[in-house]
Image (cartoon, rainbow, N blue to C red):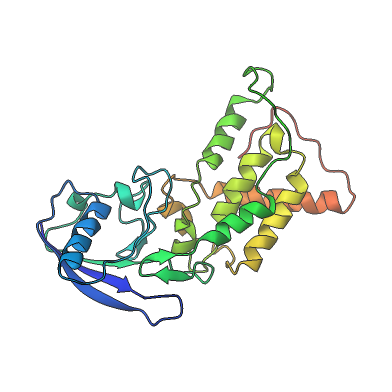
Amino acid sequence: MRFTLNIWRQQGPNEQGRFVTYEARDVSPGMSFLEMLDSVNQGLIASGEEPVAFEQDCREGICGSCSLVINGIPHGPDRGITTCQLYMRRFSDRAVITIEPWRARAFPIIKDLVVDRRALDRIMQAGGYVSVNTGGAVDGNVLLIGKDRAETAMDAASCIGCGACVAACKNASAMLFVAAKVSHLALLPQGKPERTRRVSVMLEAMDQEGFGSCGNQSECEAVCPKNISVRFIAMLNREYLRAGVVESGLPAEPESPHAEST
């Protein structure tokens, strides 16, 4: 297979970027997208040119660092996968492929296709943690957590913080990321001590980092490699309203231990 690649090249955050066209030849349909880029880079190095900088680590769909916008879609045309899980058989032979970095003010470009995503780390540092000293592992039935609640919490916890939701949103919002992190901990007993403070400080940190507001168009869910639902954004909004009630001194409605999140 053979492809024409329009790749964004930018030497640094303060440099002018531009698209540069390359040819990818003798590409096997079984190659992953990153393996195809490796092949292109080997050719550039052999010809004395500077290789294309892109980020990658596990190449197993776990870390989410392979953050590329491919033909306008974060992580590429397939749903529920990261870029490293995208294979070249997904494209037609001799197709033209445009490859860009995440586009968001909160994700400044470091070089070429690599962006600085530490803004997400700073949001987590603001409140995405628990202070409970849980000690050693205990029997599974010590903490009584309903099956539906536990599974919903784990659905939220599957977020890998890749930033695809930000790249897809027209407002570059991180609401799905924050919603997943807040909802995960709010649903579990270990997250209760910081529950009221967590949602407020994480949303404040999101605003301070320069992320936009939710566009309510579900683009984030469509490109999330872990298929995290936008219903967690609704849960985030309820948590924020609850925090406002608690902080106002009014009694919050007691939560049933068997309540299910919807």
Residue 31: horizontal and vertical position, in percent? 19, 49
Q: Residue furthest bottom?
A: 16
Whether residue 30 is situated above or below residue 48 in the rendered picture: above
Residue at horizontal 63 percent and vertical 62 percent from the top? 206
In the rendered view, does 81 fall on the left or right side of 159?
Answer: left
Q: How many marks?
A: 0
Can residue 218 be seen?
A: no
Q: Quadrant of the C terminus?
A: top right
Whether residue 203 is situated above or below residue 60 in the rendered picture: below
In the rendered view, does 2 fall on the left or right side of 65?
Answer: left
Q: Quadrant of the N terminus?
A: bottom left
**Toward which corner of the image does residue 153 lie, by quadrant?**
top right
Whether residue 204 is situated above or below residue 132 in the rendered picture: below
Residue at horizontal 19 percent and vertical 56 percent from the top? 91
**Toward which corner of the image does residue 255 lie, by quadrant?**
top right
Residue 25: horizontal and vertical position, in percent? 11, 61
Query: Is 128 or 11 nearer to us in this picture?
Result: 11
Residue 103: horizontal and vertical position, in percent? 44, 69
Can residue 256 be seen?
A: yes
Query: Is 237 or 122 nearer to us in this picture?
Result: 122
Query: Is 167 or 244 nearer to us in this picture?
Result: 167
